[in-house]
Amino acid sequence: MIITELKTQLVDLPLAQPITTAIHDMHSVGCVLLTLESDEGVVGESYVYTINAARLKAFDEMIKGFSHQLINRDPHYVGAIWQCIWDEINPTGHKGVTISALSAIDVACWDLVGKAAGLPLHHIFGACRDRIQTYASGGMWLSQSIDSLVEDATQFVEQGFTAIKMRVGSGTIKYDVERVRAVREAIGPDIDLMADANQGLRPKQAIRLGDELEEFDLLWFEEPVAAHDMEGHAKVTASIVTPVASGETEYTRFGMQQMIAAEACDILMPDLQRIGGYSEMMKVAHIASAQNMKISTHVFTEHSLCIAGAAENCISVEHMPWHGMLFNESLELEKGELIIPQRPGTGFTFNQEAIAEFEI
């Protein structure tokens, strides 16, 4: 089997309502959809996204710029393709849009490999489970009132989620504590609750907030300070009782190694787009496992399931509904867990009829 053509589509998916975090204002997610066609009629699919479709064409051009590394090559040599692109981007850098393009290509190649074999990717990677814990993340934003937070939390529990995440990091500790208290009281003690500061605090603020939130038995406190502030992360991690989760903004195994070495968090959160695709995410899972660290994947719910099915130290995937409309298939939630599909490849295929409505 050889790759015969690379195709991209640009879409802009509107959010049901505008979203605000400590550092984001969002009204849509723009995506570059990648399709790799083969001489055997099998296709590999993947995507990357940007907030509010910002600089989406730059992502598109970067992906298409690597077509010479793909056309007339066997996708089973995904490791060689990954390394060739890695070597080629040395002058432009191993972070940012270059890695996002590499990630999209890597995932699409692996999707081709799985479909050609007729196997789900977690079987190819070495399956360890067929379902994984998830947490509701598509609500409970910083811009919402307390009443709205409680309504979201209650609905998530009614939908079958046993874990939910809310946003903090307003800069006013009393306000954040009040919001977390209201949610905890609404959902009771048996539902796992996480708080995400979205990099919005300084280390001393984060430590004080972490101490104040201890009574609410959070599963983790996420991205308490700026992503690049390894020292600040380490101070927070060492100072509070609640586990710190971070890493979604870090790139490749080298960035994750730096986080581990700095003791910057307790739980690593690799993002499929920033980490370098499936090839690199499995390496990150193994590196973390060697340090007795857990991982929890960031966004990309559908396409992260095969990693969760093969990485023994993966404790959960984030349930983010932003991209569900792209696919023919739907996520299956049972008793707070997502079922890892047994369909070939990633288990998800683009729904072109739905995509046409949002195509740029």
Image: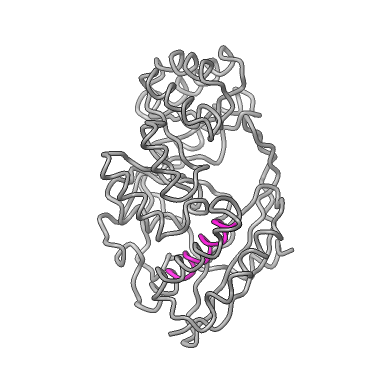
Magenta segment: 98-110
Task: Tell me how the rendering is colored.
Answer: one colour
Q: Is 207 above or below relative to 105?
A: above
Furthest-bottom residue in view?
39
Q: For the point 37% across and 44% down, which residue is it?
A: 316
Nearest the viewer among 205 and 316 is 205
Q: Is residue 67 left or right of residue 118?
A: right
Q: For the point 66% across and 34% down, which residue is it?
A: 20
Image location (x, y in percent) of residue 133: 35, 44
Q: Is 4 above or below relative to 49?
A: below
Image location (x, y in percent) of residue 317: 41, 46
Nearest the viewer among 161 and 349 is 349
Our reading of the magenta stretch's main secondary structure is helix
Q: For the point 52% across and 76% down, which residue is it?
A: 70
Query: Based on the displayed image, in which of its 4 quarters is residue 304 positioned?
Result: bottom left
Q: Is residue 29 magenta?
A: no
Q: Is 216 above or below relative to 356?
A: above
Q: Is residue 227 left or right of residue 268?
A: right
Q: Is 93 above or below relative to 154?
A: below
Q: For the point 43% across and 21% down, which residue is it?
A: 235
Nearest the viewer among 246 and 335 is 246
| Viewport quadrant of the N terminus | bottom left
Query: Based on the displayed image, in which of its 4 quarters is residue 326 positioned?
Result: bottom right
Q: Is residue 102 magenta?
A: yes
Image location (x, y in percent) of residue 49: 61, 54
